[in-house]
Image: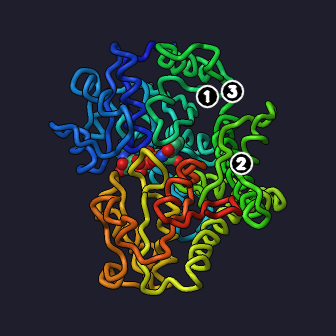
Amino acid sequence: PTKVTKICCIGAGYVGGPTCAVIALKCPHITVTIVDLNQSRIDAWNSPDFQLPIFEPGLEDVVRQCRDRNLFFSTDVDKGIRDAELIFVSVNTPTKKTGVGAGSAADLNNVERATRRIAAMSTTSKIVVEKSTVPCRTAESMRTILEANSKPNCRFDILSNPEFLAEGTAIADLYNPDRVLIGSLQTPEGLDACESLKGVYANWVPSEHILTVGLWSSELTKLAANAMLAQRISSINALSAICEATGANIDEVAHAVGTDSRLGPKFLKASVGFGGSCFQKDILNLVYLSESLHLNEVAKYWRGVVDMNEWQKRRFGQKVVKELFGTITGKRIAVLGFAFKADTGDTRESAAITLIRDFQSERALVNVYDPQVPQEQIWQDLQEASPSSSLDTIQKHVTVSPSAISALYKSMNKPAFVFDGRLVFGNTERERLANIGFKVISIGRGDSI
Ligand code: NAI
């Protein structure tokens, strides 16, 4: 197998950036170049004061150690491709908005463009690694495109190496992954390429954590893992509604359920619903795949996970209206947190967007506070969520606050409410808030105080 010394990563986003920065850190003998068409993103990665384009705990420290040593960021995609022995394709694959499969299929345009660029620019053989989350058998399309456009004496071996990092803990996840999954064709060349990539990870990941499988299993595993994670959240959220109606406490139920060693304690936190760029997109991708294979019951099963999530978001908004005496018109509501979860500035599919849109349609006045999300991003997301409203109209109802304190109890109309859609307050915090005078309502608890 080739001993890799030059890596190029196409796509300097939430996955490409952290993943390849950690590879550069752990493999000082490998030169890693991350390329992207987006000039402002690359400028931010290269900014002298390390104002990186994404917020991720620990990331800045890694970039500070490696940048301009063996880690480079560039918009010169072609050079990046030409120089590399191994290329990660880490471009975004959002849900298609129009055309066949709109609303569920993955848009593979970026993957295809990157693949065609690799074919056009390569003058030596390459290992091409699918890092983006893609539908099952995408590697086959990539291979067909590469082989149809390659120069003589250039061979391409394609690997699938899906990324399992979670935003907010990306660096810790990359340092210490539960597993690294590599899929390859089971041919001598495919297995050789697999060994080469394994050699990169082996610089810091114990070999028993590196799993090697066939290409299609690897591609499907990523969709399966996200579908099952999201399904746990939808399951606990479905139970949270029963708790609210019966007086049971979802935290107690989740804890007790999670002590069963077959189930485990993680990912059992009830909430206002999951967000982020992956769960919904990847489940819908699985739904589309199932439908294409005429497996309608399978498609229906997984779609239920997304439906439950939509219902949970709506239900939380409706609960707020109900508790505030059936109307929130003209009432001021502070929304703390706009990103889709803690420790990230990523707002894609954030439940906060749906909530604020629903509050707006009830003509409430909303104050948003999130220390990691720039104002322009908030306006852009809210505008996309309500295409029929002008930005002016939105800004009449929504204010972006510079601090959480601006929403203090003293200045609020009474009774003043706190709605906990993330179960961030345990019994002690709930009591403290109640002692200030707040009425505290938490998802999955029938016992508001
Ligand atoms: P992102 O949108 O943050 O980054 C993708 C980058 O690719 C963008 O900066 C874009 O300009 C660039 N790009 C697109 N087409 C290009 C081309 N032809 N040439 C050069 N650059 C191009 O997306 P993110 O979040 O990094 O996701 C990338 C992939 O990884 C997706 O398939 C996603 O499903 C998957 N993934 C994402 C995870 C996450 O937590 N965000 C976790 C695991 C997988």
Q: Cβ of disc 1 within 8 Å of ligand 1?
A: no
Task: Measuring from the top left, give residue 170's x and y in whole percent.
Answer: 46, 35
Q: State the residue at coordinates (60%, 67%).
A: 313
Q: Which of marks 2 and 3 is in front?
A: 2
Q: Is residue 95 above or below residue 262?
A: below
Question: Could you classify mark 2 by the number of other residues whose Cα lies within 10 Å: few (under 14), some (14-19), or many (20 or more)?
Answer: some
Q: In this view, does 2 lie above or below 60?
A: above
Q: State the residue at coordinates (30%, 59%).
A: 403
Question: Could you classify mark 1 by the number of other residues whose Cα lies within 10 Å: few (under 14), some (14-19), or many (20 or more)?
Answer: many
State how far apart marks 3 and 1 are (Cα).
8 Å
Mark sitting on residue 213: 3
* Mark sitting earlier along the chain (3/1): 1
Helix, strand or loop at label 2? It is helix
Q: Which of 416 and 197 is in front in this view?
A: 416
Mark sitting on residue 45: none
Q: Is residue 172 left or right of residue 289?
A: left
Helix, strand or loop at label 3? It is strand
The answer to whether residue 148 shows anywhere in this view is: no
The answer to whether residue 179 shows anywhere in this view is: yes
Q: Is residue 219 left or right of residue 334?
A: right
* Mark sitting earlier along the chain (2/3): 3
Q: In this view, does 271 lie above or below 328?
A: above
- Quadrant of the rendered image containing residue 330: bottom left
State how far apart marks 2 and 3 are (Cα).
25 Å
Mark sitting on residue 232: 2
The residue under label 1 is 181
Helix, strand or loop at label 1? It is strand
State how far apart marks 1 and 2 are (Cα).
22 Å
The three-letter amino acid code for the residue at tag 2 is Arg
